[in-house]
Image (cartoon, coloured by chain):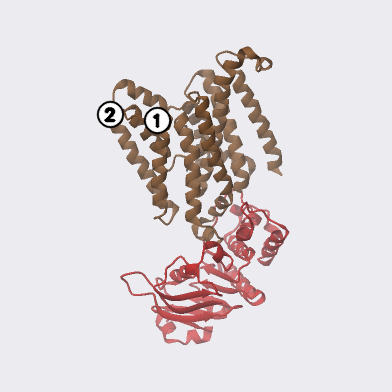
Chain colours: A brown, B red
């Protein structure tokens, strides 16, 4: 079976990329000196955190992207399709541009923003019948929030504007150890929900009517999947900023590579491939000192174009 | 067995589609649901699935009231087949049929020997065993429709509802699907109700005809229905 061969290969690749993350940087540290005591501060406090963050971000966004593409039967859906990143950016904009203070700084503000969007969507989900209405409402929320952010940008001072724009470019390196524990906790819960709703994802491929006829409680499943995606994508966005195109592109790579439609294979496959791609993107961004978001866009967009042209 | 007791179906502010109608479709029969466009065929099918609230009366599927059941309870009683194609890249015919076992498997959908057996049987029944490992995107409309019926068979429910199962099919495929349904009703004791616009085929191939002629419902043999006032008014 294809999966039996691919999973071990991808795991080896992940470990390799993770080691490379530890070894490369502004000070190159040869692999055999990686664990020497004198390098500990650089390795542990900077590169190890970044490596763990990159892995978690890749996993989260890709799993969330798979969920959204399946939930909305739309190959071009991604983690941010329902406005999670807009919610997060409103939180951050209120903090940086509007001068509203809150606990935990930027991450706290972004988490609150995503959380509000999720509560709105869960409320709406109880009232609408189908996924399409939910999708349209998500896009509407997202545009409304975008408009408010624009007003804040228009009214704010230049220095505040710059720190906001830098946040929107994304960064894996701003996370501290205590924050990492919070991020890891949020992602773990999100992943657990994702794993336990994997059969629901398979049923959702048949559309709501057939899925229900095969015993799926649609509202419950949609709520759980929304919650999972909010934790995964919202958590990542809170600590690292909005990171684009990974969640959109990786599930397609997983489908193509594993030649499967079974979410029980695609979920772990997307998680590992997502981690690999994000680690790779981070290595490139470090080599050329570029914002991570531009690298993920340049890597992800060709995949999206391929998906559209193939049809 | 499907039983309607004094059922009233409709939408607020309009004439009801069905008013105080009762009938009983026995097990082991193939019944065609016919009626003009807008007569309420799909609404009635939705009511049978429990997704359309009744304005009055009660529906019973065996001993289960669909309006008061959870999706999981309903899935053990009733399977459905619709016209649309499943759009899932790399899904094979066998995997599609395996999903029919979903209500019977656990949290992660793990299949056991009995499940594989049911899937093999269902594929054989619709004559698609040889295509089991093909991807569904490469199947013809007729093959896809038979596959969806196999999925319903794998679900192993006493009742199967089909919404225009022959809608997109050419004449030979329509005949093949209808005779497959008849075979399933007679030899497996299933209660099969399908909506259709193919009057001639419905009249010649079904055991019973359920004719909706707003706000009445008539259940009878093809000959009885053909001679009814309502049928003549609707279709002649």
Neighbours of disc 1 within 10 Å: few (<14), some (14-19), many (20+): few
Quadrant of the frame with the N terminus of chain A = top right
Q: Chain of mark 1?
A: A
Q: Secondary structure at mark 2?
A: helix
Q: Out of A164 and A123, give the one closest to the viewer.
A: A123
Front of the two marks 1 and 2: 1
Q: Residue furthest right?
A: B113
In the rendered view, tell whether residue A23 sits above or below residue B141.
Answer: above
Residue that mark 1 sits on: A103
> Can residue B16 be seen from the camera position used here?
yes
Q: Earlier in the sequence, mark 1 or mark 2?
A: 1
User: Does mark 2 fall on the same chain as mark 1?
Assistant: yes
Residue that mark 2 sits on: A154
Q: Secondary structure at mark 1?
A: loop
Residue at image location 44% in from the left, 42% down from the top: A81
Position of A39 with respect to B168 (left or right) is: right
In the rendered view, tell whether residue A215 sits above or below residue A233.
Answer: below
Q: Residue A129 at what x, y percent from top left?
A: 42, 57
Q: Out of A78 and A198, give the one closest to the viewer.
A: A198
Q: Residue B78 at what x, y percent from top left?
A: 56, 68
In the rendered view, tell whether residue A252 sits above or below residue A290.
Answer: below
| Number of callouts | 2
Instruction: Give residue B42's mark.
Output: none
Neighbours of disc 2 within 10 Å: few (<14), some (14-19), many (20+): few
> Can residue A310 be seen from the camera position used here?
no
Q: Chain of mark 2?
A: A
Q: CA distance from mark 1 to mark 2?
A: 25 Å
Q: Residue A24 at what x, y percent from top left?
A: 59, 18
Q: Residue A4 at what x, y percent from top left?
A: 71, 41
In the picture, residue A20 is in which quadrant? top right
Q: Residue furthest left?
A: A155
Residue at image location 55% in from the left, 33% down from the top: A56
């Amino acid at each position: 079976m294809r999966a039996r061969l691919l999973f071990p290969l991808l795991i080896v690749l992940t470990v390799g990329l993770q080691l490379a993350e530890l070894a490369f940087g502004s000070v190159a540290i040869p692999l055999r000196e990686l664990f020497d005591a004198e390098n500990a501060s650089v390795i542990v406090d900077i590169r190890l955190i970044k490596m763990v963050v990159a892995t978690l971000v890749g996993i989260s966004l890709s799993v969330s992207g798979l969920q959204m593409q399946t939930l909305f039967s739309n190959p071009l859906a991604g983690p941010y399709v329902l406005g999670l990143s807009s919610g997060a950016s409103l939180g951050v904009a209120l903090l940086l541009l509007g001068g509203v203070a809150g606990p935990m700084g930027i991450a706290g503000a972004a988490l609150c923003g995503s959380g509000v969007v999720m509560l709105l969507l869960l409320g709406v989900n109880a009232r609408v019948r189908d996924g399409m209405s939910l999708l349209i409402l998500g896009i509407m929320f997202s545009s409304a929030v975008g408009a408010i952010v624009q007003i804040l940008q228009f009214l704010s001072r230049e220095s505040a504007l710059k720190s906001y724009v830098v946040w929107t470019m994304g960064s894996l390196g701003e996370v501290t150890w205590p924050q990492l524990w919070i991020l890891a906790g949020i992602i773990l819960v999100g992943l657990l929900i994702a794993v336990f709703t994997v059969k629901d994802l398979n049923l959702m491929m048949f559309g709501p009517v057939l899925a229900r006829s095969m015993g799926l409680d649609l509202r419950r499943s949609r709520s759980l999947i929304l919650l999972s995606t909010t934790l995964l994508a919202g958590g990542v966005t809170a600590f690292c900023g909005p990171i684009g195109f990974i969640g959109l592109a990786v599930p397609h790579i997983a489908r193509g590579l594993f030649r499967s439609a079974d979410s029980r294979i695609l979920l772990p496959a997307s998680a590992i491939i997502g981690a690999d791609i994000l680690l790779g993107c981070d290595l490139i961004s470090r080599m050329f000192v570029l914002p991570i978001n531009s690298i993920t866009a340049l890597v992800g967009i060709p995949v999206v174009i391929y998906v559209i042209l193939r049809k | 067995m499907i039983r309607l007791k004094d059922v009233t179906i409709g939408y607020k502010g309009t004439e009801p589609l069905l008013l105080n109608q009762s009938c009983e479709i026995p097990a082991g029969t193939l019944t065609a649901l016919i009626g003009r466009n807008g007569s309420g065929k799909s609404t009635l099918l939705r009511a049978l699935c429990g997704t359309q609230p009744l304005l009055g009366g009660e529906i019973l599927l065996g001993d289960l009231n669909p309006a008061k059941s959870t999706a999981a309870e309903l899935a053990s009683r009733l399977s459905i087949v619709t016209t649309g194609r499943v759009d899932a890249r790399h899904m094979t015919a066998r995997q599609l049929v395996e999903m029919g076992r979903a209500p019977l498997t656990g949290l992660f959908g793990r299949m056991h020997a009995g499940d594989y057996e049911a899937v093999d049987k269902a594929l054989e029944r619709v004559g698609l065993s040889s295509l089991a490992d093909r991807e569904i995107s490469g199947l013809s409309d007729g093959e896809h429709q038979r596959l969806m019926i196999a999925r319903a068979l794998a679900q192993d429910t006493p009742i199967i509802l089909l919404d225009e199962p022959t809608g997109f099919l050419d004449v030979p495929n329509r005949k093949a699907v209808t005779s497959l349904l008849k075979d399933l009703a007679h030899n497996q004791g299933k209660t099969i109700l399908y909506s259709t616009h193919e009057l001639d085929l419905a009249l010649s191939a079904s055991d019973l005809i359920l004719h909706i002629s707003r706000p009445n419902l008539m259940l009878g043999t093809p000959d009885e229905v053909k001679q009814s006032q309502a049928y003549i008014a609707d279709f002649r």
